[in-house]
Amino acid sequence: MSDTTTRERMISTAMTLFRREGYQATSWRRLVEQAGTPWGSAYHHFPGGKEQLAVAAIELGTTVVAKTVRRAFERNETVEDAVSWWYRKAGEALAADDYRGGCPLATITLEMAHASPAITKACQDAFAAWHRLLVELLTGHGAQDAEDLATAIVNNLEGALLVSRIRRSPDPLDRAARHVALVIRASTGERG
């Protein structure tokens, strides 16, 4: 097993466990066991400890979501369809994970905001990166108020994921997609 593969597996496993169970509830032992990596690899790859691994997991989550957003806009002609596709995919992923997952950053953000400067900064950077990407894509589609619209899209999705998780239903995401479509139409002039 190569060092790169071991490190990547640890990061991916951490992202999953932090999303499902939280940072505090996820021990080093559990991370190593779930990743199927040697015990010494934890400290070899992450000499800064679990906090360093968390930052790497947040960075991976940032990349995963950005790829999904880009894919949504590449596969759909309108902003409304792209955002609906993104929300639907988020709901499908949540259901496939038995409503234990959701946003790769939500649980760790809620749990660790201001408890760890490094994790807080990584979360701030992640949400800022998603916002910048959405502003760029929305502007490219003629949105008049891309900054506000990007904020509304992400905030709406995050809230809907949380409520879908607790209700164990995709319905809140479906309703959120319909609601944000109204805001998108007002901003872009698209007609649904």
Image (cartoon, grey):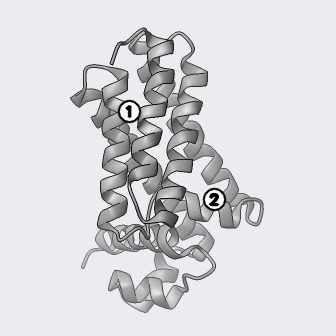
Foreground pick, 53 / 69: 69
Foreground pick, 90 / 178: 178
Foreground pick, 135 / 6: 135
Q: Amino acid at mark 2?
A: Thr
Q: Crowding at label 1, few (<14), some or many (≥20) Cα neighbours within 10 Å?
A: many
For residue 131, above or below residue 137: below
Residue designated by label 1 = 83
Q: Crowding at label 2, few (<14), some or many (≥20) Cα neighbours within 10 Å?
A: many
Q: Report helix, strand or loop for mark 2.
A: helix
**Which quadrant: the N terminus?**
bottom left
Q: Earlier in the sequence, mark 1 or mark 2?
A: 1
Question: x%, y% of residue 35?
Answer: 36, 81
Residue designated by label 2 = 109
Q: Report helix, strand or loop for mark 1.
A: helix
Question: x%, y% of residue 64?
Answer: 38, 50
Q: Amino acid at mark 1?
A: Val
Question: x%, y% of residue 46?
Answer: 53, 73
Figure quadrant of residue 15: bottom left
Residue plotted at (42% across, 8% down): 189
Figure quadrant of residue 170: bottom left
On the question of residue 67 being in view, the answer is no
Residue plotted at (37% across, 84% down): 34
Q: Residue furthest right?
A: 114
Figure quadrant of residue 117: bottom right
Residue plotted at (40% across, 14% down): 140
Q: Is residue 82 left or right of residue 165?
A: left
On the question of residue 84 being in view, the answer is yes
For residue 105, above or below residue 124: below
The mark closer to the camera, 1 or 2, is: 1
Q: Is residue 126 left or right of residue 192?
A: right
